Amino acid sequence: MLSAYIDLIRIRFIMMLAYRVNYYSGILIYTLNIGAYYFLWQAIYNNQTELGGFSLAQMTTYVAVSWMARAFYFNNLDREIANEIRDGSVAIQFIRPYSYLMVKMMQGFGEGIFRLLLFMAPGMVLACLLFPVSLPTDPGVWVLYLVMLVFSFLINSQINMLTGLFAFFVENNEGMLRMKRVLVDLFTGVVIPISLFPGWLEVLMKWLPFQAITYLPSSVFTGRTTGADAWHVLLLQAVWFLVLIVPILWVWRKARTRLFVQGG
C-alpha cells in the first residue's frame, strides 16, 4: 500500500509537468508581489530601525521566504474534494481499498514537491538577486526550516481537506472556499506578520493553527526566533498536525452518511 501512495506522489508530479509554463509565470508574479511588499515596508519603516520585532532586513527576508513558502504548501485540495463531492465521483472512493483522505494528501504532496523544485527554489534565487534578502548561514537552521516547511504543507492541507469536506453538508461551498483562502493568507502572516496584529487578535492567533503555517517558521528562518524557541515552533507544528486529524476524521465519518448524487 505504501508503494501505491508513493506512485500517487509521482503521478501528480508528472501531471504538474504538463502545466509547468504556468508556474514559470507564477515565479514572476510572486517576485512582483515580493517587490511590492519590499518597497511598501521600506516606506513604512522610513527611519525606524525596528517594527513589530523585525528589523528592515529581517522583514525583507520574511516577506521573500513567506511568499516562496506559500508556493510550496499551497494546493487546491479543498476545491478538488468539493468538486468530487458535488459530481458524485467521491462515491466510488468508498469501496476502494485505500484511504481517500490519504490519497488526496499524497496527491497534494506530489504537487508540493513540484512547486518546491520548479517554483519555490528558482523563485527564491530570483528574489535573492533582486532584493536584499539575508539567508541563514547555519546549516542547522536550513534543515530545521525544511522540516517545518513539511509541517506547513501538512497543516495547510488538513485545513483545505476539512473545508472541502463541508461540501457534504452545504452542497455548494464555493463561498467558504474563497473566504478560507483569504483568511489563511491573512492569519498565517503572509500579508502582515502576526506580531503587527492588534493585541487581542495576536493572542487569539496563538490558539489557532494558522501561525504554524507561515509566521512561526519564517520567524525561525529570519533569525527572529532561535535556540529552544525554534524547537518549540517545531513541536507546536507537530501538535497542530495531530490535533487537526481529529476533526477531519470526525467530519469524514459524519459526511459519509450524507452523500447523495444529483443527475444521471
Image (tube, rainbow, N blue to C red):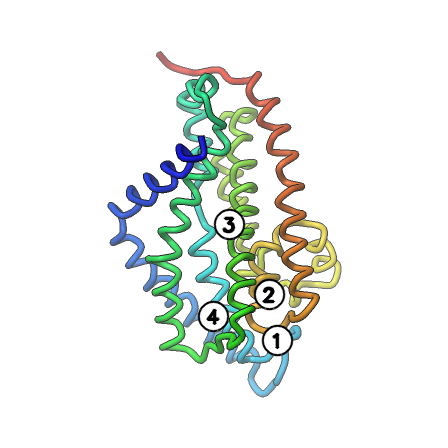
Name the residue: 44% across, 62% down: 68
Q: Which mark is residue 260?
A: none
In front here: 256 or 245? 245
- Circle 3 residue: 153
Q: Secondary structure at mark 4?
A: helix
Q: How many marks?
A: 4
Give the class, few, some or many, for how many residues have Cα within 10 Å of label 1's Cα (few <14, many ≥20): some
Mark positioned earlier in the residue sequence (4 or 2): 4
- The residue where tag 2 is placed is 193
Of labels 3 and 1, earlier in sequence is 1
Kindly identify which residue carries mark 4: 37
**Amino acid identity at mark 3:** Phe
**First in sequence: mark 3 vs mark 4:** 4
Specify the quadrant that holds the N terminus.
top left
Q: Tag 4: residue type? A: Tyr
The amino acid type, in three-letter code, at marker 2 is Pro
CB atoms at circles 3 and 1 under 8 Å apart?
A: no
Q: Given contact means CB atoms under 8 Å apart, are the residues at marks 4 and 2 in contact?
A: no
Taking the image as shown, residue 207 lies to the left or right of residue 245, namely right
Q: Are marks 2 and 1 in contact (CB under 8 Å)?
A: yes
**Residue at the image point whose x is 44% and y is 54% from the top:** 72
